[in-house]
Image: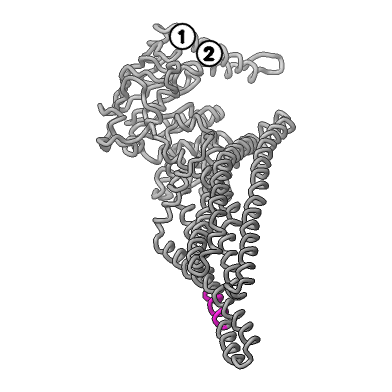
Amino acid sequence: MRSRPNFGTLLRAVRYVARHRRLAMLAYGSLFVATAAQLMVPQLVRIIIDSVIGGIQLQSDRSLAIQALLGAMVAIVVFSAVRAVFAFGQQYNAERISQNVAFDLRNELFARIQRLSFSYLDRTQTGQLMIRATDDVEKVRLFIGQGLVLALQSFILLIATLLVLWFSNPTLTLVILPILPIAFGVFLFFGAVAQPLFMAVQVRISALNTVLQENVAGLKVVRAFGREPEEQVRFGSAADALLSQQLKVARTFSFLFPIVFLIANLGQAAVLYFGGRQIIGGTLTVGEWQKFSLYLAYVFLPMGQLGFIINLMSQASASAQRIFEILDTRNEIEDRPDAKALRGVSGHVQFDNVTFRYFRGGDAVLSGVSFEVQPGQTVALLGATGSGKTTIINLLPRFYDASEGRVLVDGHDVCGVTLESLRAQIGIVLQETTLFSGTIRANIAYGRPEAGLDQVVAAARAAAAHDFIMDFPLGYDTPVGERGSTLSGGQKQRIAIARALLTDPRILILDDSTSSVDVATEYQIQQALEQLMVGRTSFVIAQRISTVRNADLILVLDKGRIAARGTHEELLETSEIYADIYSSQLHDDAVLASVDGASVDGHVPATEKASVP
């Protein structure tokens, strides 16, 4: 957290107002007119008071005094009406500007988050990103819609009033001038103190939001393990930290407002004393003194508003700093200036001595990985958890860039082609299935929104999803709950497979895509995938050898290196690691078959024995 305020980022946010020049002209033009009408009222009050007093002292001029009085009263009503109309225009258009600026910032933040590299997202909590697109943007919006207008109005009112006072009574004006530097000094001091305090508030709101988001997302796990009391304590701790910081802010501003009003009252007392002496000396009329007092209120009014302006400005400055931290984050994965579109892909993939680290200076997750896959071949990645299987498929669509070496598609380094054209050639089914709110049809057509229903149905049939979809009353128009909560794990995975297949990719990535389905469904999916993989280069990650034994190439990974490669038959003869994995899975399957298929007397039926791989 910064120890010094940085109002430059707030000024940068204010520049967004320039995108809405017409609204700005309406808002600030109305402000000028409303302020000018406001400045006319004290002058009219002086005329009324002096006319009344003059009419009393000089009986012969009573009719003229009454006329002047009526004229001034009508003028006050007219100027007040003008001020009311233009004040409405000022506030309404200022609010429209602030809402438009918030719209711009939120869209830019969302677009930026969509394109941030996965390495950045790995280091950043979801709650922190959410709070910057919501609460932080709202803080900036409030300043632009209220604080900025109020600050500009106060500045115009103060300067114009001082000019009027100087030409009306220079002596009394000199009395209040020394007070203004004191007021502005207080303004700057509290601004410097408040900005880091509000920065800390936003950080703690992010922490609180993160706890809430994680708890709601994992509510089933929380309840399953009976951790509600502990999660309540965790949330309470974050809430206490936020409360403590907000009370610290409240204490600071509890000092500010009394100090501002004390300064204003000191100035008013000085004017009362010196103005009273001028009235006694006959150099100042009562009407002029009243006019000066009213104008004096316009001087001290901005001082009284300093606290509110500082509050909004400090919050907005802290929030703007957090917003632009995201917008200014350099994306590690982006198109190079000379990037070319990847067209007519056949599916030839090559890893050339690839080494990868998730963090600079960290341990290598992949070390010197090299292999080549011909168009239309199926390559299976096998290995223990953490061996580097998922990292390989993350490098292919450039979710991350290789630390060393190259990844090539049809001879083109993936770093030298546009991301859009590269990823358009790749269909992916990840191990963690993600569905979006909407219908089943919309989720399948996510990669091709223009696809017709017959194409969607064909993809669903290929992924063995059509039958269960049609079991729903609404079929393909069935709504999908948040994150696919209304579907089973196997159903979600089959929809994800259909989604990938509908894009008709030249390269297909299946990250343990049958992990959440039963044996019968796994068989159906495997049968469909065997047909769909024809003509496509396919990468398959699986924990079980039975799902990859027909692959053209099997890569056995161990601690980030390729320990063995070949076909199923070759690896059984040449790779001790592969043979051990196969033997252990064969033994496990036999045990499971014995347990599941055993008769009441403990014997395994012959049909079950025959089915053991």
Q: Main secondary structure of the magenta part?
A: helix
Q: Secondary structure at mark 1?
A: helix
From the top left corner, tell me how far across and down residue 416 is, in percent.
28, 31
From the top left corner, tell me how far across and down residue 104 is, in percent.
44, 51
Label 2 sits on residue:
586
Image: 43 above or below 564: below
**363 sits left or right of 46 in the view:** left
**439 sits left or right of 566 in the view:** right
Image quadrant of residue 200? top right
- In contact (CB < 8 Å): disc 2 and disc 1: no
Q: Specify the label residue 42 is tagged with.
A: none
For residue 76: magenta? yes
Q: Which residues are magenta?
A: 74-82
For badge 2, the amino acid type reads Leu
Give the crowd class for mark 1: few <14, some 14-19, many >=20 residues within 10 Å: some
| Residue 288 showing in the rendered view | yes
For badge 1, the amino acid type reads Ile
Give the crowd class for mark 2: few <14, some 14-19, many >=20 residues within 10 Å: some
Of all residues, the one furthest to the front in this rendering is 281
Whole-angstrom CA distance, mark 2 to mark 1, is 14 Å
Image: 422 above or below 285: above
Image quadrant of residue 446? top left
Q: Nearer the viewer, mark 2 or mark 1?
A: 1
**Which quadrant does the N terminus fall into?**
top right
From the top left corner, tell me how far across and down residue 139 is, in percent.
55, 49
Model colouring = one colour
Image quadrant of residue 484? top right
Q: Specify the label residue 577 is tagged with.
A: 1
Q: Residue at 37%, 13% (x, y): give it.
A: 565
Earlier-in-chain disc, 2 versus 1 = 1
Q: Residue at 43%, 41% (x, y): give it.
A: 327
